[in-house]
Amino acid sequence: MALRRGLHFVFKVGDRAKTATFYRDVLGMKILRHEEFEEGCKATCNGPYDGKWSKTMVGFGPEDDHFVAELTYNYGVGEYQLGNDFLGLTLQSSQAVSNAKRLGWPLTEVGEALYLTQAPGGYPFYLVDKEQPSSDPVQKVCLGVSDFKKSTHYWTKLLGMKVMENNEEKKTVLMGFSDTQCKLELHDNSGAVDHGTAFGRIAFSCPREQLPVLEALMKKENQKILTPLVSLDTPGKATVEVVILADPDGHEICFVGDEAFRQLSMVDPKGNELLDKAMAEDKSDEWFAKHNKQKAAA
């Protein structure tokens, strides 16, 4: 499974301006590309919403060799309810810690050279206060699970990840497709997993030819397939094929054909400009205020 690789985690955001400040100015990530859509995605990339939405990819470098964040913004939704499913993204950057202190962004010291902060919407981020590596600073994504053994079996035996560290005391297992990639950490919640309405999705790529094989394996093992193999079109860009799965706790997992995705995910030098333009033209907050209404809380 060495050809499989982690790509991104999808976050639903209710305030694009504050979110852009966090990723750009606090974390120091770059806008890799920005796209606007008039209607919902047929693979529910933006959640169960049919209206206008946008997708912004942010990271320390291109998805070819970095794990990044996909920020989805639904124009009519102002906030989402957090669950206990997403437990944090960890990255190493003393510059991000310095930025947060300079900008007055709340930080809590939770360990030696380790700080906890939150992205707008309440998503937890852990910042390791050490020099940012020349490789990808994003180290791991942590998800909560209700049945440790069942989840470990799913991610290793069915999806092909290898266990790198098993900590029975902390009830965590660290795994990944290779040592050089962002890792996935599963943490035993000692109870049910609640996804709220803010639930995200983790994405991986694999060779295109593996997608139908993966789908067939999930059918054979009676595992949940949220979206059977489907083609997704982005105007003017490559068409990608995806299969959307759900693990035993309902964590959404997207597998995308690598060859087309490498074309689709090329960095757009106008990404920053396109995001700023979209935010400037977004009059949804003004409209809701003018009509004395609040944006929906999902």
Image: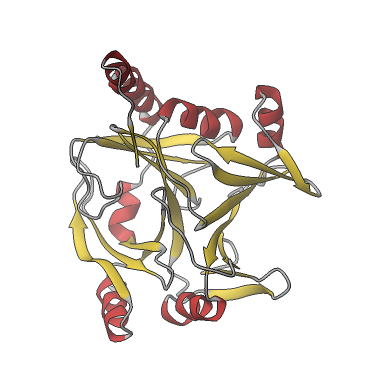
Q: Residue at x 34, y 35 (%)?
A: 34
Residue at the outermost front position: 292
State the residue in front, 24 or 4.
Answer: 24
Q: Is residue 140 visible?
A: yes
Quadrant assignment, res 254 = bottom left
Q: Is residue 135 visible?
A: no
Q: Position of residue 137 (x, y in %)?
A: 61, 48
Residue at the outermost top position: 290
Q: In the rendered view, does 113 fall on the left or right side of 242?
A: right
Q: Residue at x 71, y 31 (%)?
A: 98
Q: How many marks?
A: 0
In the image, residue 50 above or below residue 104: below
- Image quarter in which the N terminus is found: bottom left
Quadrant assignment, res 13 = top left
In the image, residue 17 above or below residue 51: above
Q: Residue at x 41, y 30 (%)?
A: 16
Q: Position of residue 117 (x, y in %)?
A: 64, 40
Quadrant assignment, res 184 = bottom right
Q: In the rendered view, does 122 fall on the left or right side of 282?
A: right
In the image, residue 36 above or below residue 251: above
Q: Position of residue 82 (x, y in %)?
A: 47, 48
